[in-house]
């Protein structure tokens, strides 16, 4: 169902859902794009039947490109030991002020995936993202399935498809995004199998290997981090992503950055030519990190509400952890940038 050539799908996923639906075409026929206005820019949409969609976000040539990536926002009306709504809203506003080219969310967007009210909270609190026409691309997390049984995930998936793509994503759970000519984002579902031979793994390898020559950086976004503090328990197959990249990443034309969430903190690693980030500070209850075993940020703070800003300028991708301190007096400046890293494109 998920095999085939890389799609020529050009579209944008907005904060309230896809701004354009994909239209089917035959694999042997050229694409027939549908152009959709997005603010002052335009996007095109084409699709190939039977394979997960791919989306394109246009950028202004010659200008620095800014992305925001983070996860574990847990949009809901809950508070207390579930989420810090104050920190979540402050992060959302700060991200709006960044006015990035796109926002990538690594799962646990909502607290209970079966509850449509949680998605209503998401739409309400991110209204400024929508008004600014900032495209949002989300991965599935375990909380997207909260309230549904393992045998019947359809009600939860319906809520997610409705919020993020409607007919353009249904029935798929993973997809890819081209951001300009130089960045390819691969959005995975780490609650589905990633072992060799699985549908998602075959598609993942196909997309990575088939990246166009102009792509300098591949961002792999998923919920369960493949590399993280080993004291935190693993989930399904996310370690398979690291195993695959340890063999393949150095031979790829593009540099690879993997961003996971799930752990409610920030971590940074470098393994076998790949930068691995943990960015789960979107508002969910904080989880401490030991910061051992090669963790590179060496942060001293245990509570780290944050997002990661990625800026592509020339041949360099600069990453900055933007931290919000919810405990400081509101008259003080709660923002800091305690970790920064730089990745140079391959020659």
Image (spheres, rainbow, N blue to C red):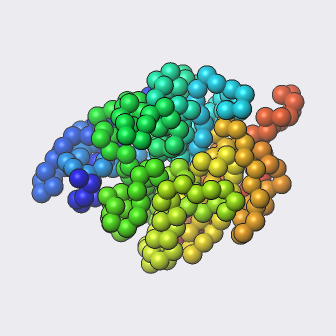
Residue at image location 45% in from the left, 75% down from the top: 248
Question: Can the viewer see residue 309 in this picture?
Answer: no
Q: Against 46, is 2 above or below?
A: below
The one of 206 and 141 positioned closer to us in this rendering:
141
The one of 138 and 94 positioned closer to us in this rendering:
138
Instruction: Report the number of numbered marks.
Output: 0
Residue at image location 47% in from the left, 52% down from the top: 190
Residue at image location 72% in from the left, 42% down from the top: 286
Question: Can the viewer see residue 215 in this picture?
Answer: yes
Q: Against 194, is 84 above or below?
A: above
The one of 307 and 38 positioned closer to us in this rendering:
307
Q: Is residue 272 left or right of residue 18?
A: right
Q: Is residue 261 left or right of residue 173?
A: right
Residue at image location 70% in from the left, 49% down from the top: 265
Res 278 quadrant in image:
bottom right
Residue 242 rendering spot, x and y as whole percentages: 52, 67
Res 39 quadrant in image:
top left
Q: Is residue 296 left or right of residue 67?
A: right
Residue 173 rendering spot, x and y as whole percentages: 37, 45
Residue 259 rendering spot, x and y as whole percentages: 56, 55
Q: Is residue 196 left or right of residue 244?
A: left
Residue 128 rendering spot, x and y as whole percentages: 55, 26
Q: Against 212, is 43 above or below?
A: above
């Amino acid at each position: 169902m998920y095999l085939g050539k890389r799609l020529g799908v050009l579209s944008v996923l907005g904060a309230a859902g896809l701004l354009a639906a994909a239209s089917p075409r035959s694999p042997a026929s050229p694409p027939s794009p549908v152009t959709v206005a997005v603010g002052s820019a335009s996007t095109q949409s084409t699709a190939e039947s039977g394979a997960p969609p791919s989306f394109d976000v246009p950028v202004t040539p010659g200008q620095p490109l800014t992305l925001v990536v983070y996860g574990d926002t847990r949009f809901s009306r809950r508070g207390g030991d579930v989420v810090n709504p104050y920190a979540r809203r402050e992060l959302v506003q700060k991200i709006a002020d960044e006015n990035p080219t796109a926002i990538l969310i690594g799962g646990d967007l909502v607290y209970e995936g079966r509850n449509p009210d949680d998605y209503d909270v998401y739409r309400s609190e991110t209204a400024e993202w929508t008004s600014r026409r900032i495209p949002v691309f989300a991965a599935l997390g375990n909380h997207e399935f909260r309230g549904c049984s393992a045998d019947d995930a359809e009600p939860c998936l319906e809520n997610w498809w409705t919020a993020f793509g409607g007919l353009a994503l249904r029935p798929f759970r993973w997809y890819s995004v081209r951001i300009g000519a130089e960045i390819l984002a691969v959005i995975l579902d780490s609650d589905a199998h990633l072992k060799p031979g699985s549908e998602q793994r075959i598609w993942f390898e196909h997309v990575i290997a088939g990246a166009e020559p102009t792509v300098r950086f591949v961002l792999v976004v998923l919920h369960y981090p493949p590399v993280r503090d080993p004291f935190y328990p693993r989930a399904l197959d996310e370690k398979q992503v690291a195993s695959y990249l340890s063999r393949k990443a150095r031979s790829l034309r593009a540099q690879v950055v993997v961003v996971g969430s799930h752990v409610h903190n920030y971590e940074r690693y470098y393994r076998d030519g790949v930068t691995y980030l943990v960015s789960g500070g979107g508002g969910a209850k904080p989880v401490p990190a030991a910061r051992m075993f090669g963790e590179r940020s060496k942060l001293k703070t245990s509570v780290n509400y944050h997002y990661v800003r990625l800026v592509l300028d020339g041949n360099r991708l600069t990453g900055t952890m933007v931290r919000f301190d919810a405990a400081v007096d509101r008259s003080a400046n709660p923002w800091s940038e305690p970790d920064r890293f730089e990745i140079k494109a391959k020659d």
